[in-house]
Image (cartoon, grey):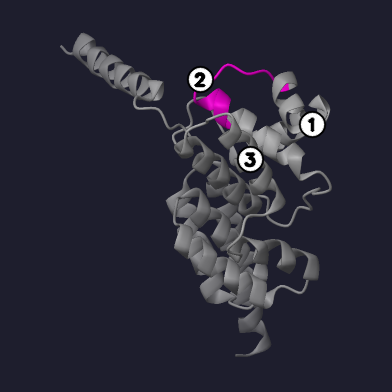
Amino acid sequence: MDGRKAEDVKEKAATYNVEGLECYEKWEVEDAITRFKEAVRLAPDDPEYHLNLARARARFGQWEEALTSLRDFIDLESDTRLRQRFRALFEVGMDPVESALTRVMTNEAIPLEEISAAMQMWWEFRIAAGRRNLPMRKPEAWASALDYIIRKLNFRQVTQVEMANKYEVSVSALRSRYQDLVETLDIMPCDYRYFRGEKNPLDMLVQAAIMLDQLEKQFRET
């Protein structure tokens, strides 16, 4: 491949990557995956495209595929710190955040389904965070924020002060991790990814929206 053609391919891959990021931010996740896959196909040696594909696949719930993309990223990435952080996702045992989570939530008889939701959130967050450096000096701070979000999503009454005390961290540390998790994962009330109740109130909102649309159409019929 001559230099001009190689440059064209590189630019096309970069364009697909930008389009994929735009789709990812708009929750057009299937389209994001398609574009990131094209970027990877055109520039398979660029670790950034593999990482973005992993992020989109994780958001879409394609766990095995996300891990495959992460392995490809790790093989290509030159940043040792990043490689180590993502390798932790393949380890069998629990990390310090997961250990703190399971200890506190189990001691308080939180259902296993909600504990699993907290673990899922932590797994997804570490991928979604991409290249960002995650402060891990106090893993209990992350655990407290994860626990707090899961309890709030599942309608358990708890305050940030109470949760901070359970994990022996400051309220400010909990709050900053809470904001990071919510913004990075774009979490909303009753989020389907982490809600573990029998009936999600969002279902009623969806049904109401459909009914309203039908009534609107009937009203405007001539």
Q: Which disc, if any, is residue 103? A: 3
Q: Quadrant of residue 152?
A: top right
Q: Is residue 167 left or right of residue 27?
A: right
* Residue pictured at 47% horizontal, 58% vertical: 63
Give the Cα separation between the discs numbered 2 and 1: 23 Å
Q: In the rendered image, which residue does mark 1 sit on?
A: 168
Q: In the rendered view of the protein, which quadrant contains the C terminus? A: top left
Q: Residues within 10 Å of mark 1 (few under 14, many from 20)?
A: few
Q: Are marks 3 and 1 in contact (CB under 8 Å)?
A: no
Q: Are marks 2 and 1 in contact (CB under 8 Å)?
A: no
Q: Residues within 10 Å of mark 3 (few under 14, many from 20)?
A: few
Magenta segment boundaries in residue numbering: 150-160
Q: Is residue 152 left or right of residue 168?
A: left
Task: Please state which of the two labelled residues, at mark 2 or mark 1, is closer to the viewer.
Answer: 1
* Residue pictured at 59% horizontal, 73% vertical: 72
Q: Is residue 156 above or below residue 129?
A: above
Q: Are marks 2 and 3 in contact (CB under 8 Å)?
A: no
* Residue pictured at 75% horizontal, 27% vertical: 164
Q: Amino acid at mark 3?
A: Arg
Give the Cα separation between the discs numbered 3 and 1: 13 Å
